[in-house]
Amino acid sequence: MLKAVVKKMVRKDHWRFLSWYRSYFGLPPAIHAYFHLLWNGGIGCAPNKLTGGSVFLRPGTTDQNVYHEIFIEEEYNIDLGNPKFMVDAGAHIGLSSVFFASKYPKPIVVAMEPEASNFNMLLLNAQLYRNIKPIRAGLWSRKAHLRIQDSMPQHGVSVYRRIHQAVAFRALEFATSCRTSMFHKSMS
């Protein structure tokens, strides 16, 4: 009875987020997460078990799926030895960048994301990591001006199209972008 009443009072996307949160972290943390949602304009958070801190997620989007992949299933928990430099091309909201910056605090992690709402979340998630360098750009086979034709970040789908006018974001050429000097210039 109480659950039905509360469910009617809570936004649908928030309810799904809280149900997901409760299933992994328990009821008291889910209640805390709900207050966080309310206090932070609908932005949720989930634990980064590598640091004891948190990462930020948008309810009703694929952010929870990506979080699950990286922090619950630990699909990225591989031994990379002693990397000196990392590139997260298509960084989405920065969860993999945060994971690698937490696991490997010494190398610079260049996090590239062209889609605006994802990039804003990337900035939020990267703010505590001095070794993450966010760049709003895409990676393409050559220098080009691209725009997102059909962006549905809530479904994790973005379609990119090469254009000649109305630049929405820059696409860095893969061969050039992999050079450290190019990134140093971009981050200055």
Image: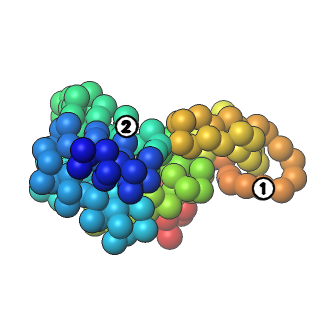
- Residue 127 position within the rendered picture, expressed as x and y whole percent measured from the top left: 34, 67
Q: Amino acid at mark 2?
A: Val
- Mark 2 sits on what residue? 66
Looking at the image, residue 122 sits to the left or right of residue 39; the answer is: right
Identify the mark nearer the N-term, 2 or 1.
2
Q: Crowdedness of circle 1 by 10 Å Cα count: few (<14), some, many (20+)?
A: few
- x 44%, y 53%: residue: 11
Would residue 109 be seen by someone viewing this image from the given angle? no
Name the amino acid, label 1.
Val
* Residue 112 point in image, percent of width and height: 50, 49
The disc placed on residue 167 is 1
Asked if residue 128 shows in the view, the reply is yes
Can you name the residue that lies furthest to the right here? Answer: 165
Question: Would residue 140 appear left or right of 44 to someone viewing this image?
Answer: right
Q: CA distance from mark 2 to mark 1?
A: 28 Å
Residue 43 on image: x %, y %? 39, 60
Quadrant of the frame with the N terminus: top left
